[in-house]
Amino acid sequence: MPKIVDHESRRRQLAEATWRVIQRDGLEGVSVRNVAREAGMSVGALRHYFASQSELLSFALNLVGERIKTRIAQMPLGQDLRGDIESVVEQVLPLDEERTLETMVWLAFLGRTLVDENLAKLAASTHGELAALFRQVVEILAGHGLLSPDADVEIEARRFHALVDGLALHAMTSEPRPSADEVRRIIHYHLERITDRQCSSALVSRLVSEEVESENQKEQKAQRRERQEEQPTLRRAQPQEQRGKRREERYERRTKKREE
């Protein structure tokens, strides 16, 4: 029985092998032969999945963005909006071994984009997706009343994006390199600075007020249900009382007639 091969999975494995070659030998060390050897397959087998080295490099670069998007999509978000935003932003920073490798690959490709038109287009597309991510983050802050009223959403989004790009570069190249905790503190500090404390307090007050109002509504509904449940009992009791009263009235009339 012929072996079933997941074509897309094999392409990802080859792209990850390309990353490892870049990590060890730099982008100039990437060749079809070197990547094939790193992946443990023949050059002919590699060409079954990628027709050219340029196609392989394009796929390897694109995989960086795809993995970031997958991580963000799979994140369990909670009730802490600002904490969730910090967690999302951390996905594009070199804070662990996996993300450090992704950042290294991205930085290695940036120089190549100056002379490779196809890679330049792909890098521009990835950059645009990241820019959209930061714009969405700032718009969410503004939509929840957490952004200062006089803030420019577009400028704040670009500033946040530039800060994270700079942090990624510093984390990979500066000496001494900032630790993951230092990078997280900088992101937290930035969010503290761009969010308005008065707006934050107002938001908390509004949420508390809405919660209290919701509890009052629940209590009112419970009281209405109790009254509705009591009404059938009262309806059944009323005829009995009326019949007893009529009997008493008839007895009194008969008594009066006998006395007369």
Image: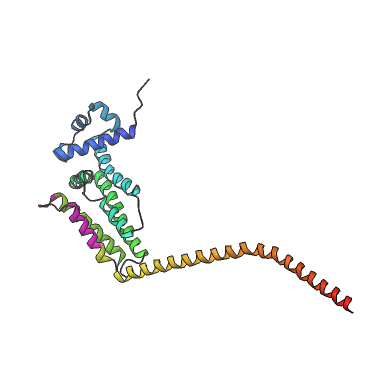
Per the picture, the main secondary structure of the magenta-coloured stretch is: helix
Name the residue rendered at 22%, 44% in the picture: 102
Name the residue rendered at 20%, 33% in the picture: 35
Name the residue rendered at 35%, 24% in the picture: 3
Q: Along the horizontal axis of the image, is 120 left or right of 149?
A: left
Q: Along the horizontal axis of the image, is 237 left or right of 109?
A: right
Q: Along the horizontal axis of the image, is 94 left or right of 246?
A: left
On whether residue 184 falls in the magenta region, the answer is yes
Measured from the top left, where is residue 237 in percent x and y?
A: 69, 65
Residue 241 vs residue 154, the one in the foreground: 241
Q: How many marks?
A: 0
Instruction: Answer whether residue 191 is visible to the viewer in this image.
Output: yes
Q: Write down the region rendered in magenta.
A: 173-190
Q: Residue furthest front?
A: 259
Measured from the top left, where is residue 235 in percent x and y?
A: 69, 64
On whether residue 230 falls in the magenta region, the answer is no
| For residue 145, above or below residue 8 | below
Picture quarter with the C terminus: bottom right
Name the residue rendered at 27%, 46% in the picture: 122
Instruction: Answer whether residue 150 is visible to the viewer in this image.
Output: no
Q: Residue furthest bottom?
A: 260
Residue 234: image quadrant is: bottom right
